[in-house]
Amino acid sequence: MALEEYKRKRKFEQTPEPPPKVVSKTGHRFVVQKHDATRLHYDFRLEMDGVLKSWAVPKGPSLDPGDKRLAMQVEDHPVSYFDFEGIIPENNYGAGTVMVWDVGTWQPLSPVPVNGKYVPGTEAEAAAMLAKGDLKFRLDGKKLKGDFALIKMKGRRPGSKGNEWLLIKKHDDAQVEGYDIDEYDESVLSKRSLAEIAGDSGSREWTSRPSSGRGKLKAAWLADAVAKLDKKNLAKKTTAKKKQKA
């Protein structure tokens, strides 16, 4: 069953998360949920095969093609998770605050470009691309738009579970150089910030966290990769600010 792992990890008498149920009719929606669990991250989910195919993105998605975001594939989630926003209680898997950061629709892109441009693909092509580890798609969300790719990393490093992908924005009219996801901390459903959802807006500052605040990353190679991304993004922001002042 597609949702067995989702079911195994949760105690549904203790968590407000929806129970596991595979739907017979699949749509083409996507959702990004900002999730403050052990460390802050974003959960990127695509509706496919009656479930939400899911990836945890530590740095969050970006509209800058220069950003290659680590995306760790996790267990499938039920389609009913699409609009889940709230608090997962302590002592439960994924305990913390969840915000619906973005929603919209997606469509697969054919792996074969036409006149140098990607064109809409089929369900069969989407399934084949996902299995191959190179899924191209187009998003039409409230915050995220344009063409993207999820590419599975082939190199197996020490401590790797084989679930590492890269989420990359393609070059198109929707790209934004120097994109800063921390500027957008508002739910597309409730218009609340993450702090307001947590019910603690007065005592906690929800801003971009330094690497020391991410929680300990068990795999050394992953910690190094995240640190390099932090350094790269800081350099981009500094350059962008200098250009604005010039």
Image (tube, helix red, strand yellow):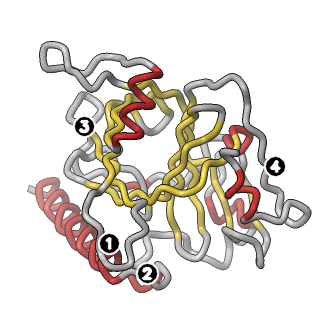
How far apart, in angstroms, are the residues tagged by discs 1 and 4? 33 Å
Outermost residue, top side: 115
Q: Earlier in the sequence, mark 1 or mark 2?
A: 2
Q: Earlier in the sequence, mark 4 or mark 3?
A: 4
Residue 41 placement (x, y as % from top left): 50, 64
- Residue type (three-letter) at the residue carrying disc 2: Leu
Mark 1 = which residue? 226
Q: Where 226 falls versus 242 (above or below)?
A: below
81 or 60, nearer to the observer: 81
How far apart, in angstroms, are the residues tagged by discs 4 and 3? 35 Å
Q: Where 208 falls versus 223 (above or below)?
A: above
Q: Earlier in the sequence, mark 1 or mark 3?
A: 3
Mark seen at residue 19: 4
Q: Secondary structure at mark 1?
A: helix
Residue 29 placement (x, y as % from top left): 57, 30
Mark 3 = which residue? 170
- Residue type (three-letter) at the residue carrying disc 4: Pro
**For residue 212, side relative to residue 42 (left or right):** left
Q: Where 4 falls versus 211 (above or below)?
A: above
Asked if marks 1 and 2 touch (Cβ < 8 Å), the reply is yes
